[in-house]
Amino acid sequence: MTANIAIDDLPIRDELRGKTPYGAPQLDVPVQLNTNENPYELPEPLVRRIAERVADAARTLNRYPDRDAVELRTELAAYLTRTAGHPVTRENVWAANGSNEVIQQLLQTFGGPGRTAMGFEPSYSMHALISRGTGTGWISGPRRDDFTIDVAAARQAIAENAPDVVFITSPNNPTGTAVEAETALALYEAAQAAKPSLVVVDEAYVEFSHRESLLPLIEGRPNLVVSRTMSKAFGAAGLRLGYLAAHPAVVDAVQLVRLPYHLSAVTQATALAALEHTDTLLGYVEQLKAERDRLVDELRAIGYEVTESDANFVQFGRFEDSHTAWQKILDQGVLVRDNGVPGWLRVTAGTPDENDAFLEAVRALKKEQH
Ligand code: PMP
C-alpha cells in the first residue's frame, strides 16, 4: 500500500476537492455540552420496551422492513396532531434516518445540479453541506447582527437569487433564535413569487421553544415542509430518526429518491417504543427548558452577552478570540462548541450538575479576562 495518497489524489468530484467533512469534536471529557444532545439517558421502562419491540422485529429480520413505515408514520402523525396545533395523518408524514437524511432526500428531489438552495447564516452547517453533496448550489442569505431574520433583506435576497429550496431554521442552530409565523410566511410568499420553490422549515429544536410550531402553515401550502427529529426532544440522537410533515404530494415526491427499505426494522421498532413514552420524554424537555433559562440568566449575571434562545442550547459571547476561549473552557473539562461564528460560542443545556460545572468554568474565564 502507498501510504501518502490523500483525498485530492483520488478522482473525486471537483466541488468536493479541498473541503472538510462535518466534524463536531467527539472528545472524552467529563462534561460534554457541544452537540445539542439531550443529557438524560432513556428511562429504564422505555429501555425494556425497546428491547421487547426489537426482539419482535428480530424474529422477522430475514424479511425486508415495512418500506413505507406505515405504523411509525401513523404514530408520528398522532404525536404532531397532539402537540403541534394542526391535524396531520400518515399521508402527510415521511420518516428517515435522522432529519439529515430527510433534508438530503428533499435536496435530491427539489435541488440537484443546476439548482440552488438558500439559508440565512449563521445557521445549521449541514444545510450547505448536504446541498453540496447533492450537487445543489448554495446561497448564503443574510441575518441581522442580533441573528434574527431581516424580512426585507431576506425577501430581496430571495428575489435576486430565485433559489429552488429555501431553509428557515426555527429555532435556529447555533444562535437559538426562533422565527415568527409572519416572517416564515413572508419568506414563503417571496420564494413562490421568485419561482415555485420548496421552503423547508427545520424545526429540530421546536419542542424547546417558547413559541408554537410553524406546522399549521403547511395547510394550503404544498411547497412548505416542516422537518423534525427524535434526536433532541425524544433524547434519541443515537436512534437516527427524523421526519417531515407536508402535503401528501411531497411525501410521494421523496419516494423517487429514497433508497428502498432505507429505515431498518430495528429503527422502526425502537422509534415506536420511544413514541409510547412521549409524555415522560417531554417531561425531560420541560426540565431542560428551565435549565436553558437558568443558563441564560446566569451567563448574563456573570457579564456575558447571550442571544435569546428558544432551543436546548445558548449562544454566548463576546470573545475577542472564540477559539482560545473554547480551549480554556475545555481545559476545565467542559466541552462547548465553536461554530465559527466570530466572537461567539454555543453551550448545550445539560443536567443541573453539568450546567453548574460549565458556569464555574466560564466564571473563571471571565475573571481571567479582567
Ligand atoms: N437540523 C438542525 C437545525 C440540527 O441542529 C440538527 C442536528 N444538530 C439536525 C437538523 C439533524 O439532526 P438529526 O439528523 O440527528 O435528526
Image (cartoon, helix red, strand yellow):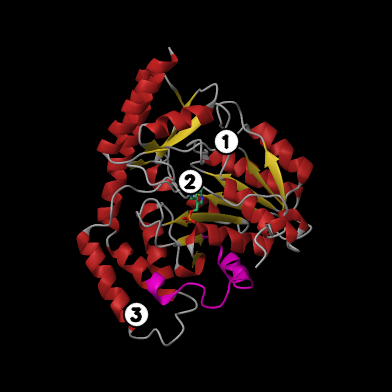
Quarter occupied by the C terminus: top left
Instruction: Give the mark, 3 or 2, whose residue is nearer the N terminus.
Output: 2
Other residues around mark 1 within 10 Å, as few (<14) / some (14–19) / many (≥20): few
- The type of residue carrying mark 1 is Gly
Quarter occupied by the N terminus: bottom right
Cβ of mark 1 under 8 A from ligand 1:
no
Where is residue 230? Give x, y as percent: 40, 57
Picture residue at 40% right of the left edge, 51% below the top? 232
Magenta residue span: 245-268
Between circles 2 and 1, the one closer to the viewer is: 2
Residues under labels 2 and 1: Cα distance?
Answer: 13 Å
Instruction: Give the mark, 2 or 1, whose residue is nearer the N terminus.
Output: 2
Residues under labels 3 and 2: Cα distance?
Answer: 34 Å
Instruction: Give the mark, 3 or 1, whose residue is nearer the N terminus.
Output: 3
* Residue 307 appears in the figure: no
Q: Is residue 263 magenta?
A: yes
Q: Is residue 29 magenta?
A: no
| Residue picked out by circle 2 | 25
Q: Which mark is residue 340?
A: 1
| Residue picked out by circle 3 | 57
